[in-house]
Image (cartoon, grey):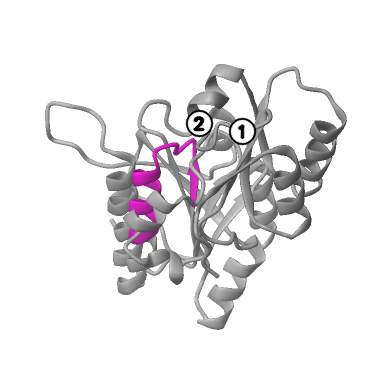
Amino acid sequence: MRYEEFTIEGRNAVIEAFRAGKPIDKLMILDGAQDGPIQTIRREAKKHDTVIRFVTKERLDQLSETGKHQGVIAYTAAYEYAEVEDILAAARAKKEHPFIVLLDNIEDPHNLGAIIRTANLAGAHGVIIPKNRAAGLTAAVARTSAGALNYTPVARVTNLGKTMEELKKAGLWFVCADMDGTTMYQLDLTGPIGLVIGSEGDGVGRLVREKCDFVASIPMKGDIDSLNASVAAGVLAYEIVRQRMQGVHGG
């Protein structure tokens, strides 16, 4: 289901939005605010597992469109998030091995949108993103995905590493991208697989990388040593596609 992205300002308006079931992507709350309505908002946010960021009054004033934020601004999602089980169900419905793209620390909405677009075209059954230090499903992401968000479920989880452990129990194994890994052509990327992509600056975080079964590198012949995150996702996703189509170990 699609939602129009918008902001909600003011304490009562935010409380009513939560209670009406609107999809709140994140909350900006005045640092140090402790009064009753703010406590109510924090309880509702915790109940809905919403990301909260505490910011200065100056920052809220900058973000406010009405000038009447009362110490709180809520951002709704442009699209509804899926559950991880929805992604696994999509694979079962197609009678295919699950192919899931997991993103660690992708904060650029244009990168996220481009990766969702590539995931759809490569036949991935869904994308998983973390709730913190990551872009959400904003209108910019929707635009960059070029419509892929209408077809590719995106789940948002609290702990990416824990989610990977649960998916391993469902038979998946994981490969992450890193320039120090094994060349992707030397890895068997068939079967139920999760492709983990990190940010351009920091790559995949240590705790998430430790959950990966393999580390894949992309051969590079140029004078610089890194690819844009969405391009790296595309290269590795299509190596998975190639190996699946051939049905043999890529070597």
Residue 185, horizontal then vertical, whole percent: 29, 51
Apparent side of residue 246 relative to residue 15 in the rendered image (left or right): left
Mark 1 vs mark 2, foreground winner is: 1
Confirm or deny contact between disc 1 and disc 2 (CB under 8 A).
no
Residue 85, horizontal then vertical, whole percent: 66, 66
Residue 192, horizontal then vertical, whole percent: 52, 64
Residue 116 in the magenta stretch? The answer is yes
Residue 21, horizontal then vertical, whole percent: 72, 60
Residue drawn 87% across the image and 31% down it: 36
Q: Residue 63 bears which disc, if any?
A: 2
> Within 10 Å of the Cα at label 1, are there few (<14), some (14-19), or many (20+) other Cα atoms?
some
Q: Quadrant of residue 118?
A: bottom left
Magenta stretch? 102-118
Which amino acid type is marked by label 2? Answer: Leu
> Within 10 Å of the Cα at label 2, are there few (<14), some (14-19), or many (20+) other Cα atoms?
some
Disc 1 is placed on an element classified as loop
**Viewer-closest of 142 and 166:** 142
For marks 1 and 2 on the same chain, the one whose residue lies earlier in the sequence: 2
One can see residue 193 in this view: yes
Residue drawn 75% across the image and 60% down it: 20
**Viewer-closest of 236 and 149:** 149
**In this figure, which residue is indicated by the disc labeled 1?**
68
Disc 2 is placed on an element classified as helix
Is the residue 130 above or below the residue 119 in the image? above
